[in-house]
Image (cartoon, coloured by chain):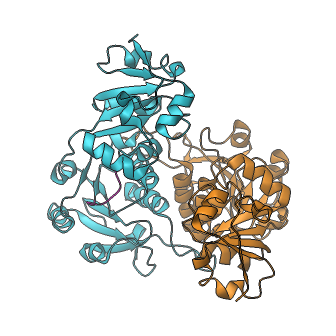
Chain colours: A orange, B cyan
Amino acid sequence: MTSLVPVTDPADPRLSDYVRLRDVNLRKSLEAEHGLFVAEGEKVIRRAVAAGHPVRSLLMARRWAEPLADLLDGLPAPVYVADDAVLEQIAGFQVHRGALASMARLPLPSVDTVVAGARRILVLEDLVDHANVGSIYRCAAALGIDAVVLSPRCADPLYRRAVKVSMGAVFAIPYARMTNRRDDLAKLRASGFRLLALTPDQASTPLDTAPMGDRVALMLGSEGDGLSSHWLDEADERVCIPMSAGALANGVDSLNVTAAAAIACHALLRA
Amino acid sequence: MTSLVPVTDPADPRLSDYVRLRDVNLRKSLEAEHGLFVAEGEKVIRRAVAAGHPVRSLLMARRWAEPLADLLDGLPAPVYVADDAVLEQIAGFQVHRGALASMARLPLPSVDTVVAGARRILVLEDLVDHANVGSIYRCAAALGIDAVVLSPRCADPLYRRAVKVSMGAVFAIPYARMTNRRDDLAKLRASGFRLLALTPDQASTPLDTAPMGDRVALMLGSEGDGLSSHWLDEADERVCIPMSAGALANGVDSLNVTAAAAIACHALLRA
């Protein structure tokens, strides 16, 4: 087994990749600056490695090293071990899930590249919640979505919580980030994708009856406001998930974006 | 407007309903002991009041009192106002969403009572995550579910985070908690419900093709392990949501329980 490096000082500069993992603003700038992301737990770390992400380092309580022994063997990266109390001081929370790994990001492919050959794709506009992004990737991977395209401001799929909620599906589904939302939507249409905008508006076309064509791009909007009017205008068709007659009486006028995405991916798979 | 009661001491015993709102274990025993729950934010508080829950007290930054003025007028409960820093010390987090209300729980109806007249119900076995429970109630309220039945150990729908994620749907959908899981499942069947057990097992009946009958009870299992073998055995039919051919290659062998619930509620509504 590789040699483990004990650490005892939460301020040890070798651990700076792991500081304050729940501080979203800090992490955004730290991870962008160093081109890293953090994977948490054995399963997710293994999937990140299998997807080709270079490991910068690992950090864990000593008891987690044994189950990872085969992975750690021959890994050209330091493996730091620390007590639970030290881990908590560094990460800012109790690290239940086992090991943490700091991984290097890979250059994202272009939109053109990820949608080449794809039949069904999701296009996410400005989702802000990392758990929602992770949840949507897990659905996409289970339900036959070939690629995901993110708006310029959509939340990062490699943020720790998104990776965790996705159960590693962020490594399985190819994705790209738009550089220009207007041009990139037009390019998708030019590539033969039918752009469907999902909206809670019950006067729009029920998703199950919408013509799909050979290539479908389903656009999903942000948690609070849904799709912007520009994206709604760019769509070939506005589609909705029909709600029950009693939904409004129940005080509910929409589904949350992950529920809507699940139902929509399921509908696309059956179409 | 009702008179506001300024508070400055986070240890003020009048605020004990609101302490450490993120400490799940503390909150479970505190809320059970006092028969209370906490509603957060104007919309949710209004829905809780409309559902008939008596208000024990409210606690908020002074700026939130004005939008709630009509509700506070004539309310026979104290309205405490405090600085943001004091609120954070009491609640244990930054209270962004506006007001907090401590509400009295009402006696839950029996299983028999909530399912009388219901056509489609959900039966939740031992879900542990409050956000998942809240999310499932929101789907249920949007997609025509008439009632929810909870296993004895299922997470509490009136826990603050469940209420918040449900957008108040926990007040719209009647629900009951089983006292005996074995007897209560048998009673549901005796009442004419067809018990469908949702499982990731792709060899089971695809949900879309399962006969539903006049009354359907869809059983959903806990996040980690799914339904227990006992519940699977009690079911009239085991049903699955078909995944794509590539799901396993993507490393995904199941949907999360909220995504599965959304797809299943949608399928029940269309059946």
Which corner quadrant holds the N terminus of chain A? bottom right
Image coordinates for residue A20, horizontal then vertical, percent: 68, 54
The relative height of residue B253 versus residue B22 in the rendered view (above or below) is: below
Q: Is residue A28 left or right of residue A224?
A: right
Q: Magenta includes B155?
A: yes
Q: Can residue B123 be seen in this snapshot?
A: yes
Depth check: B185 or B202 in front?
B185
Q: Can residue B144 be seen in this snapshot?
A: no
Quarter holding residue A59: bottom right
The relative height of residue B116 versus residue B5 in the rendered view (above or below) is: below
Magenta stretch bounds: B151-156
Image coordinates for residue B101, horizontal then vertical, percent: 39, 31
Depth check: A75 or A6 in front?
A6
Image coordinates for residue B33, horizontal then vertical, percent: 26, 44
Which corner quadrant holds the C terminus of chain A? bottom right
Determine the residue positioned at 49% across, 19% down: B67
Determine the residue positioned at 16% across, 53% down: B112
